[in-house]
């Protein structure tokens, strides 16, 4: 049986398709219509090479992947993972922050009697990853002189106009702390 990468809400990919797309594109591919694709990453517009170059530039010390806990044994192995690195290079127009970027997920791995992967289901929230990248000030904006590290960023409001808003004057999400 071919290896299969299954994602929530879309068709699975076989091993050859994953190799052709590249691991970042395979994992970040979205089933949303093009006009709803996030601007911060569109797997349909990235190549294998460009996706790897983008993440290598943003995370120059690497993007480690580790198993945190194993919940079941073969033939259906379920485990929790963490993917992490330090945001030390620019990412799509956002300046590096030097902060740890990480996300967690769950994998369900079905193996055959020789312990070869038959199916892989990966569940995670990619926005946990991109939230860290988007914290960096826009490289087209100039940092403010404020020493408490407030930044002026360009935000789009609902009427289609952009506003420059200080991050200290925006309401913050109470769940982000």
Image: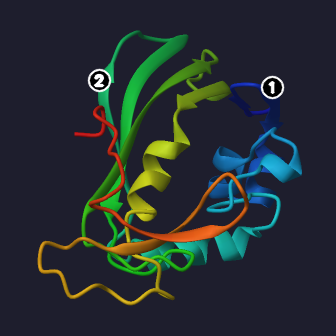
33 sits left or right of 49 in the view: right
The residue under the point 60% across, 20% down is 111
Report x, y in % for residue 48: 72, 68
**177 versus 38 height, above or below:** above
Q: Residue at x 32, y 61 (%)?
A: 85
Q: Is 161 positioned to the left or the right of 53 in the image? A: right
Q: Quickly name the residue at label 2.
A: 69
From the viewer's perspective, is residue 153 above or below residue 34? below
Q: In the rendered image of this protein, does residue 13 appear above or below residue 6?
A: below
Dot 2 alpha-carbon crowd within 10 angstroms: few under 14, some 14 to 19, many 20 or more: few
The image quarter containing residue 101 is bottom left
Quadrant location of residue 40? bottom right
Against 69, residue 87 (above or below) is below
Q: Earlier in the sequence, mark 2 or mark 1?
A: 1
Q: Residue 2: where, in percent of width, then height?
A: 80, 32
Q: Quadrant of the C terminus?
A: top left
Instruction: Identify the image quadrant of the N terminus.
Output: top right
> In the image shown, does 126 or 55 lie closer to the viewer?
126
Q: Dot 1 lies on which element?
A: loop
Q: Nearer the viewer, residue 76 or 130?
A: 130
Q: Residue furthest left?
A: 147
Which residue is drawn at the image coordinates 62% and 69% (left, top)? 162
Q: Could you tell me how far apart the alpha carbons at marks 2 and 1 are, in whole angstroms?
A: 27 Å
Q: State the SS at label 2.
A: strand
Count of numbered tags: 2
Q: Residue at x 44, y 72 (%)?
A: 153
| Rendered location of residue 110, percent (x, y) | 61, 18
Front: mark 2 or 1: 2
Identify residue for label 1: 1
- Where residue 175 appears, as percent x and y from the top left, is 30, 32
């Amino acid at each position: 049986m071919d290896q299969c990468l299954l994602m929530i809400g879309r068709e699975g990919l076989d091993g050859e398709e994953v190799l052709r797309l590249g691991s970042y594109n395979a994992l970040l591919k979205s089933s949303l219509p093009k006009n709803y694709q996030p601007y911060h990453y569109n797997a349909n517009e990235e190549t294998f090479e460009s996706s790897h170059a983008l993440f290598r530039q943003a995370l120059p010390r690497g993007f480690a992947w580790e198993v945190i806990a194993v919940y079941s044994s073969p033939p259906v192995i379920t485990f929790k993972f963490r993917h992490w690195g330090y945001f030390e290079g620019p990412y799509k127009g956002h300046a590096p922050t030097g902060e740890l970027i990480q996300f967690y997920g769950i994998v369900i791995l079905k193996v055959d009697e020789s312990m070869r992967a038959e199916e892989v289901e990966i569940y995670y929230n990619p926005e946990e990853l991109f939230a860290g990248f988007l914290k960096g000030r826009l490289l087209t904006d100039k940092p403010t002189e404020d020493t408490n590290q407030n930044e002026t960023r360009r935000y789009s409001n609902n009427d289609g106009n952009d506003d420059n808003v200080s991050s200290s004057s925006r309401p913050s999400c109470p769940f982000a702390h």
